Amino acid sequence: MDDDDIIRRIGALVEEEHSLERTLAANGPDEAAAERLREVEVALDQCWDLLRQRRARRASGEDPDAASVRPPEVVERYQQ
C-alpha cells in the first residue's frame, strides 16, 4: 500500500465515520452503528499512523515500504 492508497482509505473511512455519526445523531442509540463507528475510528488511527511512519522513513532515507500497521492497542494509546 503506497501513500496515495492510504490517503484514499483515510478519505473513505472519514466519509463512513461522518455517515455513522449522522445516523447515530438522527436515530439515537444503535449498538451496531456505535460498534462500527469505534472500528472506523481505530482504522483511521492506524492509517494515519502508517502514513506518518512512511513519511518519517522516507525523510530519514529509509524504505517507506518497511512501515507496518500497528495494532489497535498501540495506536489507541497515542495522545492527540
Image: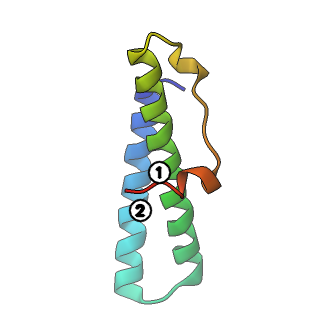
Tell me the tag on residue 10.
none
Against 37, residue 1 (above or below) is: above
Residue nearer the viewer, 54 or 26: 54
Residue 44's disc is 1
Query: From the viewer's perspective, is 45 left or right of 19?
Result: right
Contact, mark 1 vs mark 2 (Cβ under 8 Å)? yes
Q: Position of residue 54 (x, y in %)?
A: 47, 25
Percent coordinates x, y for residue 53 in the rendering: 48, 30
Residue at image coords 50%, 36%: 50
Three-letter code, disc 2: Glu
Tag 2, which secondary structure?
helix
Which callout, 1 or 2, points at the residue further toward the start of the chain? 2
**Residue under pointer 2:** 17
Residue at the image point whose x is 40% and y is 25% from the top = 55
Q: Residue at x 43, y 70 (%)?
A: 20
Q: Nearer the viewer, residue 54 or 3?
A: 54
Type of amino acid under label 1: Leu
Q: In the current view of this chain or complex, which residue is farthest to the top?
A: 61
Where residue 64 sits: x, y (%)?
51, 19
Q: How are the residues colored?
A: rainbow
Q: Position of residue 79 (x, y in %)?
A: 42, 56
